[in-house]
Image (cartoon, grey):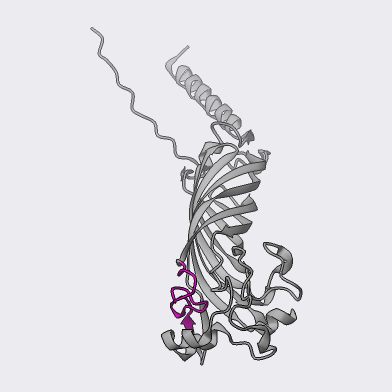
Amino acid sequence: MNKTTHVSMKFTILAITILAANLALAQPTNFNTQRNWSMNKKELMIGLGGTSFLGDLGGANQNGTDYSLKDLDFPSTGFGGSIGYRYRFHPYYATSTILNIGMVRGDDAKTGDLIRNSRNLHFRSPIINLSQRFEVILLANEKIGRRFNIPGLKGFKDHNEQFYIFTGIGITYFNPKAKLNGSWQALRPMNTEGQGLSGGPSEYLPVTATIPFGVGVRMGINRFWRVGIEATYVKTFSDYIDDVHGTYFDPAIIGATNGADAAYLSNPASQNATWFGPGDQRGDKQNDAMIYLNLTVYRNLTYSTVGRGPHIRFGRPKYRAKF
């Protein structure tokens, strides 16, 4: 065998080896394996959607039903957004740190229930919620198709669909306000139920612990981006997100301490006003809740590429001289 033939055979063997490797890499693999799900461990999350309030103010055209979706006040739906970091530490488990910012509203004037409509209270409040969530992936269809776009080579496409549930713990800041004379005024300093005044209840804090419960679905656009939708029910441990909790306080005492605006906003009832006097029920003393419905975009921070494949670094071998 001459030298030219020997070199040709070496190049032929090398070409066959490379082609075989490409064909092997092009075969679909299950995403839920140690190798593949770990390519999607870290993600940046950005969401945008609507917020709804479940509390004392507003509600459906019926008697109030605590913590029930039947009492949603759709005309008072607000807007919100979120940003977060998700870490998937197991094929079926993940944890996320989420910051939600939004606005919740409630308005008695928008309900057909006679008592609440006559009460005529309203509010809006910014919501800043920081939560740590634990996520369980119930159903997943996650597969990586062929890596290289070789003409004529058939293979499965990427699949990345998940259905999941989650819960966790968080903390929320709120600041209820009411509109008077064209401007929104903070209600907490007005002591609208006599908080902190002689004979009144204690003042409430503008923060509360929360527990989110939710469900979501997401699907992959490619190996870097996913989109999904999440519905989150947020249980709070405060009944003052709307500044309404207990009974009416004497507006004369409120006015003498905090001014005429505070006295009016404590009891703005104009019809059936005799139903709402000092000592009468103003709220139901059940803690408030919120609902988020977000469209969420995910950016994979784990998977990096050179061209269309994962970035694999090869070290340079070290040789030891032989003597």
In magenta segment, residue 201: yes
Outermost residue toward the front in this view: 199
- Image-based side of 66 in relation to 178, left or right: right
Residue 147 seen: no
Above or below, 272 relative to 86:
below
Q: Where is residue 319 drawn, in percent x and y?
A: 29, 18
Of residue 3 and residue 212, the one placed in the foreground of this image is 212
Q: Residue at x 60, y 31 (%)?
A: 23
Q: Where is residue 214 drawn, in percent x and y?
A: 63, 53
For the record, the magenta segment spans 185-204
In magenta segment, residue 315: no
Q: Looking at the figure, which quarter contains the C terminus?
A: top left
Q: Residue at x 54, y 74 (%)?
A: 243
Q: Where is residue 104 drawn, in percent x and y?
A: 57, 71
Residue 21 seen: yes
Q: Where is residue 56 drawn, in percent x and y?
A: 63, 72
- The total number of labels drawn is 0
- Image-based side of 119 in relation to 186, left or right: right
Q: Residue at x 74, y 82 (%)?
A: 114
Outermost residue toward the top in this view: 323
Above or below, 321 relative to 47:
above
Above or below, 225 relative to 79:
above
Outermost residue toward the right in this view: 62
Outermost residue toward the left in this view: 323
- Image-based side of 131 in relation to 286, left or right: left
Q: Main secondary structure of the magenta part?
A: loop
Of residue 314 and residue 244, the one placed in the foreground of this image is 244
